């Protein structure tokens, strides 16, 4: 392991300016860093990935509408003109609140970053409500890797169904289950239906993609709970008209490669045979929330969110600002992008006011700009400041808002072109799916702690092959038989 020590003594920087470390390159972290572009500080942005992810459009990557590059611009490119900002790749593994240092690691290299002000915006990951084993068979929707794996699973299911001869196996392969009837689940189910009923319907000879069974299920009693019962009921009816089976008040009790077991509101359990499962229910805050809670004494809730002061700082540590999905604010704000964006900007403003000797701005107040979700092409629902829209008008509003927040002119142009191809026509420009996309995550998990990455990204020690292998029954890294 290589350790890079702090380049300068605590309290100083190469420029002599205060150091602001931003953990996370999502909405909260990126917008906080950009808000500090004119401040007399040195900003270091530490991200687990080298890109900023526009997470609300992940489902369009998974269903072949957009490429990953259009919703995930490189963080360095976004901040290339900001001279006081530095981007560092690494996963934060420790925060020393007494020494005021952040420790990150990547491919065996550990780096220590001193800070004077810290903004923690590490976001949240998928939660399986204590059933983490479900993740092997039902990927979430939180990363580019998730979306590409799901793309491979969805398109691959149709390809395998084309080869199958057993009617029961064809039905299993052509059954798609989306768990979670929030915005992500509704949008995902809608696009799988569009894919089956429009894009693929003439592409196969032995199967009819229009006969695909798409199921959207949730333990809640309504679709899109944040939108209220009126819009939720309209969304449910529209999903039914698209041929999507909406099963509410239904809990997943077990899940495996062949399908899932669910329990209805009357307590009865039943089995759904399905090859492709998508998990779009529940979130769990970054482990950094619990780490900070242990270090500062701040309370951490069951979802891993750390309780913050009204000004987004931690008790006894006014130099630590927590924004976005990690923060459990006294006013209980929702885990949406706008909360992270506004929180990041607020934290940046508080830092600048402190440096200028001004009084703090006051408690953070989230300005609710509404909720939106697409159901299908030309149809969406929107709840904006007591105004409720549905259908085409809501869909146009959704297009405009999402284009506005996509980072970069090039991404906006190519996104519009791909939307035209997919929404006005029947095509999907991103239908490439590889075996690596589907099985890469599971292969890495199978290697586990024994996998040691070199500085170039490859394994230092290759797993030992068995002494003798039947050439007709070779297995891959996840134990699957291969040709």
Image (tube, rainbow, N blue to C red):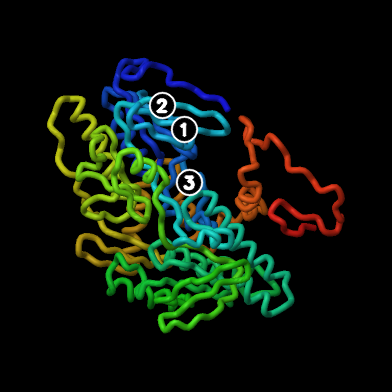
Sort mark 2 into few (<14), some (14-19) or many (20+) by Cα contacts within 10 Å. many
Sort mark 1 into few (<14), some (14-19) or many (20+) by Cα contacts within 10 Å. many
Compared across the picture, whether 165 is left or right of 31 comes to right
Rendering quarter of residue 479:
bottom right
Location of the C terminus by quadrant is: bottom right
Q: Residues at badges 1 and 2 in contact (C-beta under 8 Å)?
A: yes
Considering depth in this image, is 99 or 206 the residue closer to the camera? 99
Q: Position of residue 334 (x, y in %)?
A: 29, 56
In this rendering, the answer to whether 439 lies above or below 379 is above
Q: Residues at badges 3 and 1 in contact (C-beta under 8 Å)?
A: no
Which label was assigned to residue 70? 3
Total labels: the figure holds 3
In this rendering, the answer to whether 431 lies above or below 316 is below
Q: Position of residue 129 (x, y in %)?
A: 44, 62
Q: Which residue, given by chain and number where applicable, does mark 1 sit on?
A: 104
Which label was assigned to residue 200? none
Mark 1–mark 2 distance (CA, rounded to whole Å)? 8 Å
Observer able to see residue 396: yes
Sequence order check, earlier mark of 3 and 1: 3
Compared across the picture, whether 300 is left or right of 112 comes to left
Q: Secondary structure at mark 3?
A: helix
Mark 3–mark 2 distance (CA, rounded to whole Å)? 31 Å
Rendering quarter of residue 276:
bottom right
Sequence order check, earlier mark of 1 and 2: 1
Q: Nearer the viewer, mark 3 or mark 2?
A: 2
Q: Secondary structure at mark 2?
A: strand
Q: Secondary structure at mark 1?
A: strand
Q: Which residue, given by chain and number where applicable, does mark 2 sit on?
A: 113
Mark 3–mark 1 distance (CA, rounded to whole Å)? 28 Å
Considering depth in this image, is 426 or 351 the residue closer to the camera? 351
Observer able to see residue 82: no
């Amino acid at each position: 392991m290589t350790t890079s020590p702090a380049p300068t003594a605590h309290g100083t920087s190469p420029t002599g300016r205060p150091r602001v470390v931003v953990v996370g390159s999502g909405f909260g972290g990126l917008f906080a860093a950009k808000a500090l572009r004119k401040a007399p500080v040195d900003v270091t942005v530490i991200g687990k990935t080298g890109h900023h992810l526009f997470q609300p459009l992940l489902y369009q990557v998974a269903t072949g509408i957009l490429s990953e590059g259009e919703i995930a611009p490189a963080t360095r490119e976004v901040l290339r003109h900001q001279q006081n900002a530095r981007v560092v790749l690494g996963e934060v593994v420790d925060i020393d609140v007494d020494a005021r240092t952040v420790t990150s690691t990547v491919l065996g290299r550990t780096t220590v970053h001193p800070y004077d002000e810290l903004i923690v915006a590490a976001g949240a990951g998928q939660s399986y409500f204590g059933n983490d084993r479900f993740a092997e068979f039902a990927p979430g929707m939180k990363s580019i890797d998730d979306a590409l794996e799901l793309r491979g699973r969805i398109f691959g299911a149709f390809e395998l169904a084309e080869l199958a001869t057993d009617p029961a196996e064809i039905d299993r392969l052509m059954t798609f289950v989306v768990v979670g009837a929030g915005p992500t689940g509704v949008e995902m189910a809608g696009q799988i239906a569009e894919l089956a009923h429009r894009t693929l319907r003439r592409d196969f000879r032995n199967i009819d993609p229009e006969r695909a069974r798409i199921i959207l299920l949730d333990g809640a009693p309504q679709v899109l709970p944040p939108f209220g019962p009126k819009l939720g009921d309209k969304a449910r009816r529209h999903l039914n008209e698209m041929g999507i089976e909406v099963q509410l008040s239904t809990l997943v009790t077990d899940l495996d490669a062949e399908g899932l077991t669910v329990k209805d509101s009357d307590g009865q359990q039943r089995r759904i045979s399905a090859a492709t499962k998508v998990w779009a229910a529940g979130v769990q805050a970054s482990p950094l929330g619990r780490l900070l809670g242990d270090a500062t004494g701040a309370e951490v809730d069951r979802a891993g969110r750390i309780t913050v002061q009204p000004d987004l700082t931690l008790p006894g540590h006014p130099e630590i600002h927590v924004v976005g999905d990690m923060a459990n604010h006294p006013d209980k704000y929702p885990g949406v992008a706008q909360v992270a964006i506004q929180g990041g900007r607020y934290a940046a403003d508080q830092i600048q006011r402190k440096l200028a000797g001004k009084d703090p701005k006051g408690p953070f107040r989230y300005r609710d700009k509404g909720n939106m979700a697409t159901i299908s092409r030309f149809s969406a629902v929107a709840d904006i400041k007591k105004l409720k829209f549905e259908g085409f008008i809501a869909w146009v509003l959704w297009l405009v808002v999402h284009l506005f927040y996509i980072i970069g002119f090039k991404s906006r142009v190519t996104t519009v072109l791909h939307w035209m191809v997919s929404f006005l026509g029947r095509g999907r420009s991103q239908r490439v799916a590889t075996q690596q996309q589907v099985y890469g995550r599971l292969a890495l998990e199978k290697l586990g702690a024994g996998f040691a990455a070199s500085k170039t990204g490859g394994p230092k020690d290759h797993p030992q092959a068995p002494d003798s292998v039947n050439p007709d029954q070779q297995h891959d890294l996840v134990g699957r038989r291969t040709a």
